[in-house]
Amino acid sequence: MSLGERILVYRQQKHLSQESFAHIIGVSFATLNRWESDKQTPRGLQKKRIERILKKQENLTETKAKET
C-alpha cells in the first residue's frame, strides 16, 4: 500500500474530510489531495508527522488484533 493510500485509509477510518485532516496536519486541502492520489509525496516535517500518525494507528491496530 502506498503512503497516499495509507493516508486516505487513516483519514476515512477517522471519519475526517480532506479539508479537516489537512487543517489538523497543517497543509492545504490541495496538498493532501495530491498526497492521497499519489501525485506528490510529503516531505520534511510533514512526512515525519504523517509517518508518526500512521505508525501510531498501525500499532493500535496490531495491539487490538493480538487481544482478540
Image: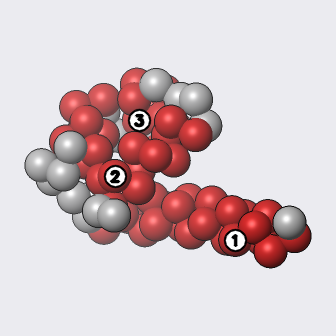
Residue pointed to by mark 1: 62
> Is residue 48 visible to the viewer in this orientation of the structure?
yes
Q: Quadrant of residue 32?
A: top left
- The disc at residue 47 is none
Task: Determine the residue located farthest toward the right in the rendered image.
Answer: 67
Depth-wise, is mark 1 or mark 3 nearer the camera? Answer: 1
Residue pointed to by mark 2: 5
* 3D distance between C-alphas at marks 2 and 3: 15 Å
Q: Position of residue 4 (x, y in %)?
A: 30, 53
Q: Is residue 30 above or below residue 64?
A: above
Circles 2 and 3: CB distance less than 8 Å? no
Q: Secondary structure at mark 2?
A: helix
* 3D distance between C-alphas at marks 1 and 2: 18 Å
Way the structure is coloured: secondary structure
Q: Residue at coordinates 61% horizontally, 37% vertically from top-left?
A: 14
Q: Position of residue 60 (x, y in %)?
A: 72, 64
Task: Determine the residue located farthest toward the front in the rendered image.
Answer: 68
Residue pointed to by mark 3: 22
Q: Quadrant of residue 8?
A: top left
Depth-wise, is mark 2 or mark 3 nearer the camera? Answer: 2
Q: Residue at coordinates 29% horizontally, 62% vertically from top-left?
A: 2
Three-letter code, disc 3: Ala
Q: Earlier in the sequence, mark 2 or mark 3?
A: 2
Three-letter code, disc 1: Glu
Q: Is residue 7 above or below residue 19?
A: below
Q: Position of residue 36 (x, y in %)?
A: 28, 44
Quadrant location of the N terminus?
A: bottom left
Local packing at callout 1 (Cα closer than 10 Å; few below 14, some 14-19, many 20+) is few
Q: Nearer the viewer, residue 27 or 12?
A: 12
Q: Residue at coordinates 51% horizontally, 47% vertically from top-left?
A: 10
